[in-house]
Amino acid sequence: MSENKINTRITELFDCASFEKFTAARPNGFVTGCGKVGGREVMASFIEPDEMSESYFAGLQDHLALLEKALEKKVPALIVMDVPAYHKTADKSPFPNDPVKLLADKRGVGRWYFLHSKLSGKVPQIAVVLNRLGASLTFPVALCDAAVMVEAGGMSVGRPDVVEKMSGRKVDYNELGGPEMHYGAGSIDHVTKEESGAFEWVRKYLDYMPGALKKTEAAPEYDGDKIKGIIPASPNFAFDTHEVLRGIVDGGSFFELRKGFAAELITGFGRVEGRTVGIIANNSSVRGGLFFAETCRKSARFISICDSFGIPLIFLADDAGFMVGPEVEKAGIIREGSLLFSTIANSGVPKLSAVLRRSYTAGVYAMAGPGFDPESFIALPGAVISIYGKAVAEKLSARGVDEKENGAIAEMMSGAEHPRKLLEMGMLDGIVEIENLRSTIGRFLNKVSSKISGSGRPVLLV
């Protein structure tokens, strides 16, 4: 039964008959091997869900050997996570038959965590969660760059019964470690109903990584005329930036990551004229497109993935800056914002920053604006780049400040509301009509093609 299950998973993930097993014929807890996914070499380790191994420690050695080989050969590594057979013993013990070796041996679970950490940024790592994982099996998932989970899956350090024993609190598993909880918390990138959907997601993700087969250019879903009316002129009206993307990227190519987490910021891969790009876009239809602590973490992690693997970045700004108030201060918005700034500054991939409608205060910098060395900083004709918006300026002017301060506010707003003035002052590299934004990005990609290379720096675990 288990052999058939593993073979089915291999068939769904790998190109036809391309997977070759590394592991011995005897059951040992893991099935490891290498094959082709979309024509490129990929290594994978499948946890054996049914066959009891004589020694789980011995089986782990095969898994570690695969990770070491992936590091040596610079080949993407996949871990397909199920519940090992030792979890299903009659006494339901969470411990395998050699717990001390797994904990304290130099080739134990610690080495598993170590190797994922060493692989980070050097090769793409993806986790597929097919069952409810606990304890030591959970951390490798988060150590990977990307993770997909089926609806029947989950993960938590302690099971509900352990939580109750230690804290006296009864918890529902879905609240503790279910897929929707992890999707909303940003621990995983995607949830799918069936295993086949999870493996299809992995195949699509790898299509955007270095070494994938080159894709041909496709027309965008929206033409120039349709995209013209998407962005409201007034900043008081929200809009969904996904609609703008339909007129920029090649049709059907946008692949969003962590959509369920901090949805005021859109992050994902796409293609423009056949070339892969990373896209970061504010989304005013969710929480006004403001930056919160979690928004900064989401952006920083995605930027680090693109930096590691040499994927140029496109920032589409429509933000009112950073959220204020005691709640966000307690959440560490200054700390997380600083992490984002540092991540942008230290990323080596080419960046284009475009202001769609507005960009206020430090939000300008959070979208790789002036001072952060974008290759190009551009704006749409009606964009406002300012310390604050018109509504705030009017409130400040009406609060009874002196004439000099009112004059300074009026002068600032006058300059900010006319991108042409910023262009004349050398503060903008260009003003672009929205229907020409795709072609502008295409020219940017042509210009920087020789500068694109991956840094190999570890992916941020935030």
Image: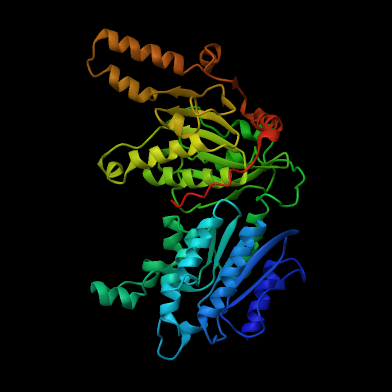
* As drawn, 118 above or below 91: above
Q: Is residue 128 left or right of residue 158?
A: right
Question: Splitting the image into 4 quarters, where does residue 247 fall?
Answer: top right
* As drawn, 313 above or below 37: above
Q: Residue furthest front?
A: 106
Where residue 117 appears, x then y in whole percent?
50, 57
Q: Is residue 409 left or right of residue 218?
A: left
Name the one closer to the observer, 336 or 254: 336
Where residue 230 appears, x then y in whole percent?
57, 35
Where residue 443 appears, x then y in whole percent?
70, 29
Number of marks present in the image shown: 0
Where residue 17 appears, x then y in whole percent?
77, 71
Q: Residue furthest bottom?
A: 90
Q: Residue at x 59, y 21 (%)?
A: 431
Q: Residue at x 34, y 15 (%)?
A: 409
**Residue 120, visible in the rendered structure:** yes
* As drawn, 211 above or below 23: above
**Residue 76, visible in the rendered structure:** no
* As drawn, 178 above or below 186: below
Q: Is residue 134 left or right of residue 312?
A: left
Q: Which quadrant of the figure contains the N terminus?
A: bottom right
Name the one closer to the observer, 56 or 288: 56
Q: Residue at x 47, y 54 (%)?
A: 260
Q: What color scheme is it?
A: rainbow
Q: Residue at x 63, y 67 (%)?
A: 44
